[in-house]
Image (cartoon, helix red, strand yellow):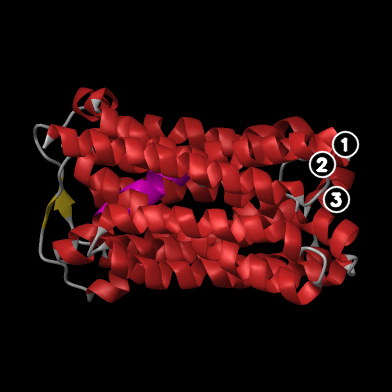
Amino acid sequence: MATAIADRPSAPVGLIHLSLAVGGFAIGTTEFATMSLLPDMARDLGVDAPTAGHVISAYALGVVVGAPLLAVIGAKMARRTLLIALMAMFALGNALSAVAPDYGTMMAFRFLSGLPHGAYFGIATLVAASLVEQRRRTQAAARVLLGLTVATIVGVPLANALGQVVGWRSCFVIVAVLAGLTAALVALFAPRDRADADASPLRELAALRTPQVWLTLGVGAIGFGGLFAVYTYLADTMAAVTKVSTAVVPVALAVFGVGMTAGNLIVPRFADRALLPTAAGVLVWSAASLMLWPFAAGHLWSVIVAVLLIGVGGSLGSVLQTRLMDVAGDAQGLAAALNHSAFNVANALGPWLGGMAIAAGYGWTSTGWVGAALALGGLAMLAVSWAVERRAT
């Protein structure tokens, strides 16, 4: 992405950050609420539950493909204009999902909805960081991501409750409205900027020649997978091991969201002082909390505590976003967008390895050990990145 040339913002910085976070709230709502609405969706679309689950995979694939593709295509656009276009595209994808007549078109529309996800977060965090001092960049990026974490506490339960009363299609209608609202807020409040005249898709692709970019993406793709290994099988584990009613599961999911939100409020303050040590600390925290999971799963009170602690590890996203700003050079947009592709790789890797452990007979709680191993793998990748940087300097 080109380095933006922006006019002085006419709106307060906090209001601009809030406007960008509304887009994160919309994205988080559709990403997580879809999982809870799968049974009703499967019935209406005439497929079984496992087949209906592929619509989640289609969305994730859209994120992985769309993040770098749209960042490169939008290289010569002003960031404000690109953000409005991305949210308009997101609104369209979700509006079409709300009226999808069959499974095939639903798959196509969910893929379309996923395309702007990573590029939006990447460009939005760059805009948010550009409005504050250098020493507060991670906090600014985290404010955009707060929209997503708050969605897991508020947006997902509300969308699920409305889906149970009105129907699952209403969830996508709400998300489309929120996306349209975000586009309007960005148009009203985001600073008007002009793209760098030297910007080009080739300059964005230059990020792919930087080893530190790949190492940082590897930290996210591996280290973040541990969180998803436990989160994906949380409901099944609570039913089989904790032996509680399914009505309690939404409470645990909301507590997980509280942990993510707390992490994104607290951790960036440390990251802005010492970025790489903070990233290492988050990964150590994640490994330790995931190791607690097999011992905590037997009792509801300990499940709530463990889920809260695991959720704090979600703050890794904003920390790595700032790291990519430091190592990407002129290719800021592509690197920032690829961060969210990496997290969707983690969203596939963690559940896949966790599922393998369960299928091999190690039990539902084995996802904690799998998750801890992934967090330590991310820590090892970070150590390599750190060592390479020290050697170069």
> What residue is pinned by disc 1?
47
Q: CA distance from mark 2 to mark 1?
A: 30 Å
**Looking at numbered disc 1 in the image, what kind of residue is underneath it?**
Val
Q: Main secondary structure of the magenta part?
A: helix
Name the residue at 67% across, 47% down.
369
| Quadrant position of the N terminus in the picture | top left
Q: Which label belongs to residue 366? A: none
- Viewer-side label of 2, 3: 2
Measure the C-alpha gap from mark 1 to mark 3.
Answer: 10 Å
Residue at numbered disc 3: 39
In the image, what residue type sits under mark 2? Answer: Tyr
Q: Secondary structure at mark 3?
A: helix
Please report whichever mark, 2 or 1, sits nearer to the chain's N-terminal start: 1
Q: Residue at x 56, y 42 (%)?
A: 374
Numbered range of the magenta stretch = 116-126
Q: SS of the residue at dot 2? A: helix
Secondary structure under badge 1? loop
Decide: is 287 above or below 225. below
Q: CA distance from mark 2 to mark 3?
A: 27 Å
